[in-house]
Image (cartoon, coloured by chain):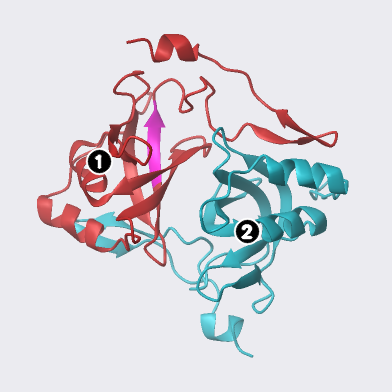
Chain colours: A cyan, B red
Amino acid sequence: MSYEPTYTPPPAEAIQALVDAVSFDAAGLVAAVAQQHDTGEVLMMAWMSREALAETLATGRVCYWSRSRKALWRKGETSGQVQRLVEARVDCDGDTLLLLVDQTGVACHTGRHNCFFRALRRGEVATLSRPLADPEALYRA
Amino acid sequence: MSYEPTYTPPPAEAIQALVDAVSFDAAGLVAAVAQQHDTGEVLMMAWMSREALAETLATGRVCYWSRSRKALWRKGETSGQVQRLVEARVDCDGDTLLLLVDQTGVACHTGRHNCFFRALRRGEVATLSRPLADPEALYRA
């Protein structure tokens, strides 16, 4: 039997309790690390506002805050590469979230499965993985 | 045969190349996510300055920047709970690092193995794990 994680939105009071456990920074944001729930792959890091976190918890679909666009960023809205929430965890200081997610397709805007694809190899900064999707196609209007 | 990861410090030019691949923020810092290299457990998130990253790459022992103490924070200096670097990866935008590490003991100052131990259970923010070490003992002078 294949297991598909499901997400049951918690009641509004529970969402509020989790949001209240977070220490948002001076800009009203908290760092959120997305990890694929089953493989443990760290996919990306982005930022959430209070509203983004509450929406994510209420809908089960991950919504960040885009610092460049200064707007809610419903991951996959344009590209279709959505992240379904499995669980949101808060760290000891309340200033970082770990999102256990189920990633559809690729997490990175370059078309790679995750964003952490550069490291030193033979004394140079090398690219460790190839795009699995064409970024042009992902973001075509 | 048991495998122990080893870290060979790269030449100074390579360290510089990796540091140059990072976009430090207005405060001169970059977010760094530490992941246990073999289990995939996300341990913690902290910040690195240019100097902290260069020292980490040169020594193979993870050094962060403490925003509260405004000083280099050689992880485990007081507590003995050091992180040995296996590999530092840079993300697509250069504004987040993923540190594959080998954690000695516990990563969290509460004595828990990782910092992400709070999540919703039955409508409340619950603590998911117990301390494995006594924080009082870890930080005794």
The amino acid pointed to by label 1 is Thr
Q: Label 2: how many residues lie within 10 Å, few (<14), some (14-19) or many (20+)? A: many
What residue is disc 2 on? Answer: A49
Q: On the picture, is B61 further left or further right than A87? A: left
* Percent coordinates x, y for residue B113 in the rendering: 52, 25
Mark 1 sits on what residue? Answer: B56
Mark 2–mark 1 Cα distance, whole angstroms, equals 31 Å
Q: Is residue A36 left or right of residue B76?
A: right
Chain on which label 2 sits: A
Seen from the viewer's position, the closer of residues A106 and A28 is A28
For mark 2, give the secondary structure: strand
Q: Which residues are magenta?
A: B99-103
One can see residue A10 in this view = no
Residue at the left extreme? B12
Where in the figure is residue B46, as x and y percent of width and height? 42, 42
Residue depicted at x 23% and y 62%:
B20
